[in-house]
Image (spheres, rainbow, N blue to C red):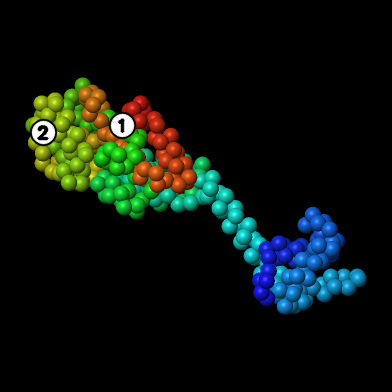
Amino acid sequence: MAQGQFEYFQMRCFVAVAEELSFRRAAERMNMTQPPLSRQIKILEERVNLVLLERSTRHVRLTSAGESFYHSAVDIIQRSEHAVLNARQAERGETGNVALGFVPSAAFKFMPLIAQRMATEMPNVSLSPVEMMGYEVIEAQRSGRIDLGLTRMEAPRGELDRIRVISEPFVLAIPKAHHLAQKEDLSLADFDGEPYISFTRDRGGYLKETLNALFYACDVVPDTRFEVSQTHAVVSLVNHGLGVAVVPRSARVIQMNDVIYREVDLPMQFRSDMFLISRPGRGSVVQDRVRNLIVDTLSPFRNGEEAP
């Protein structure tokens, strides 16, 4: 072997002697006999072309070169052990980074639940949340820019793996000063002809299409005054008395002074669904663990079973 090259085991032998300053104790620590240990130190010194230890019948001492080499050797050993530990943790899915794209409405309730549980159960896994519109989540998943995605849009079957993780009912959002705010037993029919705040078709497309189908099925034609893409913008316009709205139940966490939310009985097929999507066969162990954690965390919302 060329000068300057040495083995990891020889470094460990040297560190043991340097710390014990005794070949006997170092041999015991390394679980070997003294002659092979001495031979490994001699080979190491030959390969680095340095005297690392001063030996006598009475003591063992580090030379100045040995002192410097000792600190570097300890650092290399620690980093090597750390690298092995990290690799084993990665193999078990205990470390890593997962980029999770999500639609803005998931930020109200669902993303905080996921982040809290990951902090508790997977503290060494870094979660990188990326807020996107629904179609952007699907595009980012196709291109590999994110590992997992939460979107209300359904990806084409076979192209991406998808799991429905949320199916929540809709609620009515009404200005406090509105005449419907005092009415009991509200139904969707009460919105017929009322000033209405709608989602846009381009950026709030899933909710727009679902609610349009709902109004059509119930023979209701609200008077659409504004169209916006984000749920918080819908609720803000309701708060200013500009119309009524229908929003997913999770939007009730948006508390504004002049908005009230009312439960309403609607046909079961009209719900606000959310899907967890991923690329087939591309997931790592840590991505699979995070996917399973998300599915389990959101399980109370999968069939609309969560209490209002």
Give the image quarter of residue 238. Answer: top left
Residue placed furthest toward the top: 185
Q: Which mark is residue 205?
A: none
Ranked by sequence position, the earlier of labels 1 and 2 is: 1
Relative image position of residue 101 (x, y in whole percent)? 34, 48
Quadrant in which the C terminus appears: top left
Q: Which is in the foreground here, disc 1 or disc 2?
A: 1
Vertical order, 132 against 168 (above or below): below
Q: Give the residue at x 74% y 75%.
A: 46
Q: Give the residue at x 79% y 54%.
A: 31
Q: Residue 242 vs residue 144: left or right? A: left
Relative image position of residue 170 (x, y in whole percent)? 25, 31
> Residue 13, can we see it?
yes
Mark 2 is on which residue type? Pro
**Residue to which mark 1 is pinned:** 167
**Residue to which mark 2 is pinned:** 222
Characterize the local packing of mark 1: few (<14), some (14-19) or many (20 or more) Cα atoms within 10 angstroms. many
